[in-house]
Image (cartoon, grey):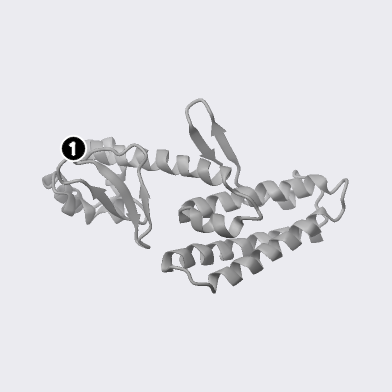
């Protein structure tokens, strides 16, 4: 079992009995599905073709599904194809982050929120807020009201989301927007604090102490890094 865990470290999340159950039923997708939520945070199901073994998409507990860009296949050993699923998750999410980045606009934010998976919305919203806040801080030397303007834009975006969440949405869409509202409230409060402290440099401790998100795309291999 230790060899299997070294090959696929997420097996360390399982007890010995749970791992033995997977290893004894490595070709039984229904048994392995029972342990997905322990192996991967919020993953509850994979679409696996009974004939080809192709794994086409993944599902969260909120019933959100994401189709894999390069579908892996279910084949022995079990740790091998689970590792392939893990790598494909990263690759697919990276591609969707690039799509989310390329299609974003403040004016069309309401539609953008509904057009992308929840993880993409949550992550890229933080990236755009971070870059927008840093732009406003850098502009303070030329425009002392730039942080005030940024704060007002945050307020307006929140009001739009609050109105949007009361519209005719699916349960999943409402869940994504409610989570984004929570994040946006915190982001707005940070901007208000920066404004009150008259922060004029991105190296000011009041900004440096915040959790910041930066988007980096490597055009050579198509990978995306969020740091």
Left or right? Give the position of 58 relative to 103. left
Residue 189: tell me if it is visible.
no
Q: Quadrant of residue 149?
A: bottom right
| Outermost top residue | 220
Q: Residue 226: x, y in percent?
A: 54, 42
In the depicted structure, whether residue 23 falls above or below residue 168:
above
- Residue 57 makes an appearance in the image: yes
Quarter-of-image position of residue 190: bottom right
Name the residue beneath numbered marker 1: 75
Which residue extends farthest bottom? 166
The location of residue 72, given as percent across then percent down, is: 28, 38
Q: Residue at x 11, y 46 (%)?
A: 24
Q: Dot 1: what SS?
A: loop
* Crowd rating for badge 1 (residues with CA inside 10 Å; few <14, some 14–19, many 20+): some
The spot of residue 208 in percent (x, y) is 69, 47
| Count of numbered tags | 1
Please state if 140 lies on the left or on the right of 103 as rendered: right
Residue in the picture at 82% in, 46% down: 139
Q: Is residue 139 left or right of residue 72?
A: right
* Front position in the image: 166 or 189: 166
Quadrant containing the C terminus is top right
Q: Estimate the x, y position of residue 99 in percent, counting from the top left.
A: 51, 43
The residue that appears at 63% across and 50% down in the rendered structure is 105
Name the residue: 31% across, 41% down: 85
Residue closer to the observer: 189 or 135: 135
Which quarter of the figure is the N terminus placed in? top left
Q: Is residue 198 above or below residue 26?
A: below
């Amino acid at each position: 079992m230790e060899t299997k865990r070294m090959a696929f470290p997420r097996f360390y999340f399982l007890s010995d009995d749970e791992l033995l159950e997977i290893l004894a039923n490595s070709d039984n997708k229904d048994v392995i599905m029972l342990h997905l939520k322990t192996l991967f945070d919020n993953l509850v199901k994979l679409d696996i073709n009974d004939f080809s073994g192709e794994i086409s998409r993944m599902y969260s507990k909120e019933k959100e599904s994401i189709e894999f860009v390069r579908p892996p296949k279910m084949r022995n050993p079990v740790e091998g194809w689970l590792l392939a699923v893990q790598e494909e998750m990263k690759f697919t999410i990276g591609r969707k982050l690039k799509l989310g980045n390329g299609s974003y606009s403040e004016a069309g934010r309401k539609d953008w929120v509904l057009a992308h998976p929840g993880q993409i919305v949550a992550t890229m919203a933080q990236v755009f807020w971070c870059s927008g806040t840093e732009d406003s801080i850098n502009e303070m030397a030329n425009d002392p009201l730039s942080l005030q303007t940024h704060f007002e834009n945050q307020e307006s975006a929140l009001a739009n989301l609050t109105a949007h969440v009361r519209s005719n949405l699916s349960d999943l869409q409402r869940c994504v927007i409610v989570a984004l509202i929570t994040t946006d409230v915190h982001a707005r409060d940070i901007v208000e604090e920066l404004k009150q402290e008259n922060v004029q440099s991105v190296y000011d401790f009041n900004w440096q102490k915040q959790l910041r998100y930066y988007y980096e795309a490597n055009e050579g291999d198509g990978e995306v890094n969020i740091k």
